[in-house]
Image (cartoon, coloured by chain):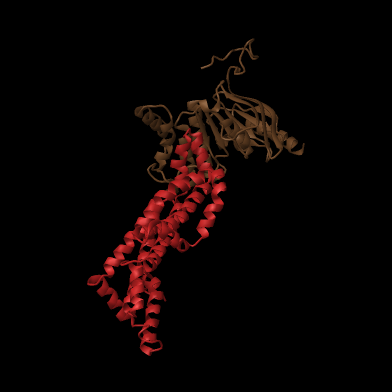
């Protein structure tokens, strides 16, 4: 494990793997083109450790593209992405897809879905069981995990897919519009429980959302992106106390942050 | 007014009842030479007698064994090959034409070739049927693997599953419905080829040979009995595969 230096600039002789303290993910000179269209060009980004960062921006600016490149499921044309100096494949990653229907394994019971990623870690049987029990307890699920996904509601399936992502105690969790296909009641429930677990476990989280309320509500920091070629337009810190719920959305701090985000968003869409 | 419940249950049999009734009617009216068209009862008697006392049962069994042997051989060859082809786009593209060509070639056209290779025995019948079935299964498995949606594979990759585990744990299961389509078409085709082979490649047993012999001596009830046996065999095999699919691919269509 690298020891993180304390100065904000690389000390003399620091390797290219140097990263500032408190930073988990460093993106440097990232470049990505789709059929000759440049989506990212020389893009830099630092993501704080143990925080929830929401990614918000105009349609087509490449929000999902960004987290897919960082999580290692989408190749990029240039640049470097490191997790405390490590590559993506050396990092425990959890990923929750928007479309849970095509992400959970319908041929396995819910509990076996959640258990699935544990077999790829170098752990003893007891350690695996401990991790499994721990995630099941954290989420305190009220439905039967011995059912198959197709016997469950959409929200329950997405909850299973979130538990599957978190069972390995990931260093980084990626959430790609995880609640956008669910009914409102379920969304409120999942937002609540997810915040609780993420804060308990201090997981560095990157959340893509197309819903500004959600992006602000869940975030420690909102990352606002521009149109293509994409740059960081602004980073807004939102430090309201947790747990945050529907009540939070009427507090002055929330309204202020959201209004500011909206201004920047409008400016960037027009630009 | 609703008909009683049991009437609804019997509705699927209506077509069969009409067919047999029409047959009996035509026979009774003497519209067709009774030598060519015996009564349904005569045909049913021939079937029953053949099954209980005669050799129909033995021929039936012989055809089943041949069909299932060729199907089993086809599966052993075609499933692994189909997976490999489906998993590699480049490999598939390079031999797609060859597969498509042979798939479009009637397997019966290959009889003479297989006769030269394997001689006029049991092997030829099974080999040609296996050949035909294998091609159908092969391209269905390959299509299933190729067409498997990518997101679950991606999910498995991000959970650190090695490539071969993604294939066995996700892609293969994802392609199961298409594999079952291939298995059903494969076993039906194997039956067709076995019956034809029994008719024309020096056979002394099997349903195909039985149909042919009955026709030559104008024993029409016997012929209809053998045809019915072949039909029932095809139907039951298809049904068994459907039931197996529903049990195994329990998540299908949900």
Q: Position of residue A184 (x, y in %)?
A: 54, 44
Q: Is residue B160 left or right of residue B204?
A: right
* Residue at x-position 39% and y-position 41%: A145
Answer above or below: position of B83 versus B160. Answer: below
* Residue at x-position 56% and y-position 53%: B97
Instruction: State which quadrant residue A136 falls in.
Output: top left
Q: Position of residue A154 (x, y in %)?
A: 49, 46
Whether residue A97 appears in this view of the structure is: yes
Q: Which chain is brown?
A: A
Q: Position of residue B183 (x, y in %)?
A: 42, 55
Seen from the viewer's position, the closer of residues A130 and B145 is B145
Q: Is residue A175 left or right of residue B172?
A: right
Seen from the viewer's position, the closer of residues A36 and A194 is A36
The total of numbered circles placed on residues is 0
Quarter of the rendering occupied by the C terminus of chain A: top right
Whether residue B229 appears in this view of the structure is: no
**Colour of the chain lettered B:** red
Q: Is residue A250 left or right of residue A262?
A: left
Answer above or below: position of B244 versus A240. Answer: below
Answer above or below: position of B9 versus A214. Answer: below
Answer above or below: position of B18 versus B178. Answer: below
In this view, the residue farthest toward the left is B53
In this view, the residue farthest toward the top is A12
Q: Position of residue B141 (x, y in %)?
A: 47, 50
* Residue at x-position 42% and y-position 76%: B1
Instruction: State which quadrant residue A179 falls in.
Output: top right
């Amino acid at each position: 494990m690298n020891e993180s230096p304390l100065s904000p600039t690389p000390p003399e002789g620091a390797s290219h793997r140097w990263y500032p303290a408190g930073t988990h993910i460093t993106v440097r000179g990232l470049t990505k083109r789709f059929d000759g269209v440049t989506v990212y060009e020389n893009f830099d980004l630092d993501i704080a450790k143990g925080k929830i960062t929401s990614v918000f921006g105009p349609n087509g600016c490449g929000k999902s593209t960004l987290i897919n490149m960082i999580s290692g499921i989408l190749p990029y044309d240039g640049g470097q992405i490191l997790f405390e100096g490590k590559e993506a494949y050396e990092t425990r990653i959890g990923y929750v897809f928007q479309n849970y229907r095509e992400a959970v394994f319908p041929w396995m019971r819910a509990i076996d879905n959640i258990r699935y990623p544990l077999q790829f870690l170098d752990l003893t049987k007891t350690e695996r069981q401990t991790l499994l029990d721990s995630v099941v307890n954290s989420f305190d699920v009220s439905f039967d995990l011995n059912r198959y996904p197709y016997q469950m509601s959409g929200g329950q399936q997405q909850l299973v897919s979130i538990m599957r992502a978190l069972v390995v105690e990931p260093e980084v969790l990626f959430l790609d519009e995880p609640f956008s296909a669910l009914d409102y009641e379920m969304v409120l429930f999942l937002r609540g429980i997810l915040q609780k677990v993420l804060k308990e476990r201090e997981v560095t989280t990157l959340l893509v959302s197309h819903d500004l309320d959600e992006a602000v509500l869940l975030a420690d920091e909102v990352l606002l992106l521009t149109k293509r070629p994409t740059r960081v337009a602004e980073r807004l810190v939102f430090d309201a106390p947790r747990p945050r719920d529907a009540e939070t959305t009427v507090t002055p701090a929330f309204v202020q942050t959201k209004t500011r985000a909206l201004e920047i968003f409008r400016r960037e869409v027009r630009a | 007014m609703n008909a009683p419940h049991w009437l609804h249950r019997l509705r699927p049999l209506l077509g069969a009842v009409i067919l047999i009734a029409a047959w009996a009617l035509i026979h009774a009216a003497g519209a067709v030479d009774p030598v060519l068209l015996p009564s349904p009862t005569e045909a049913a008697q021939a079937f029953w007698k053949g099954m209980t006392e005669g050799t129909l049962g033995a021929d039936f069994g012989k055809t089943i064994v041949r069909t299932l042997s060729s199907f089993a051989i086809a599966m052993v060859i075609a499933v692994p090959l189909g997976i490999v082809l489906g998993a590699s786009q480049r490999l598939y593209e390079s031999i797609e034409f060859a597969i498509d060509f042979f798939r479009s070639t009637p397997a019966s056209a290959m009889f003479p070739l297989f006769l030269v290779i394997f001689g006029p025995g049991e092997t030829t019948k099974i080999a040609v049927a296996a050949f035909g079935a294998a091609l159908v299964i092969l391209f269905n498995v390959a299509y299933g693997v190729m067409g498997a949606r990518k997101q679950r594979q991606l999910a498995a990759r991000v959970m650190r599953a090695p490539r071969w585990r993604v294939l066995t744990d996700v892609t293969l299961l994802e392609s199961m419905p298409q594999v079952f389509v291939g298995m059903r078409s494969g076993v039906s085709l194997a039956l067709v080829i076995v019956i034809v082979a029994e008719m024309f490649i020096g056979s002394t047993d099997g349903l195909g040979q039985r149909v042919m012999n009955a026709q030559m001596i104008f024993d029409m009830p016997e012929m209809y009995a053998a045809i019915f046996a072949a039909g029932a065999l095809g139907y039951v095999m298809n049904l068994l595969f459907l039931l197996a699919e529903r049990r195994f691919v329990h998540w299908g269509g949900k």
